[in-house]
Amino acid sequence: MSSKKISSNAVTSKPARAKTTIRWEKQLDEPEKLGWTLTVPMPKKYKVSKRTNNLAKPIRRDVAHLSKPFPTQIPPGVLKHKASKRILELSEPRHVADPFPLNVRTNPFVVSPGALKYKATKRTKELAEAKEYVNNHTRDDPFGISPAALIAKPKQRIIELAKPKNIHFLPSIF
């Protein structure tokens, strides 16, 4: 037997509730479902499992579970109420600007006169120039074989893989 020390809090605190009891309580709260019958002829070997049968049943909700009575009762004081000025203002829809502006230009790509008179600064001109990159990856003969590859001695498996597959030529096809 192990000799574990029990703290004073463990003795006085409430014991933890088993999680399985919550699951059973949920199942008891659910209304019982109706059975499911096969409507389409199925093979004779097929048998409906309990799980499929349970999932196929429609959920029946009790009317007593509704939070509010339906239809809701309208109090008589609301029917006699007169709306204030502010309520009437808020009830009107907002006036939104037209989707298309009225002063549509004939050519939207015309450069404005202010942009034509603008003189670029030295720094703006520097930034406008394209940056030149040095290509370090150029070779004199890009399709040439490197000297190290010419000296290399291949293994037997590499030689075997390098040979073409035997393809049978059938002259009757052509």
Image (cartoon, grey):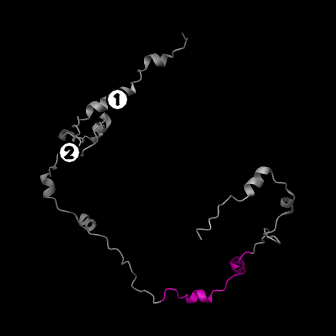
Closest to the observer, 41 or 97:
41
Q: Is 88 rendered above or below residue 39?
A: below
Image quadrant containing the C terminus: bottom right
101 in the magenta segment: no
Q: Which residue is drawn at 70% across and 76% down?
A: 127
Label 1 sits on residue: 22
Q: Name the residue at 29% across, 41% down.
A: 43
Helix, strand or loop under label 1:
helix
Total labels drawn:
2
Mark in the foreground, 1 or 2:
1
Viewport quadrant of the N terminus: top right
Residue bounds of the magenta highlight: 107-131
Relative image position of residue 20 (x, y in whole percent): 37, 27
- Find residue 138 and report its image quarter: bottom right
The residue pinned by badge 2 equals: 68
In-image side of 24 versus 4 (left or right): left
Whichever of callouts 1 and 2 sits on the residue coming sooner in the sequence is: 1
Image location (x, y in percent) of residue 2: 55, 12
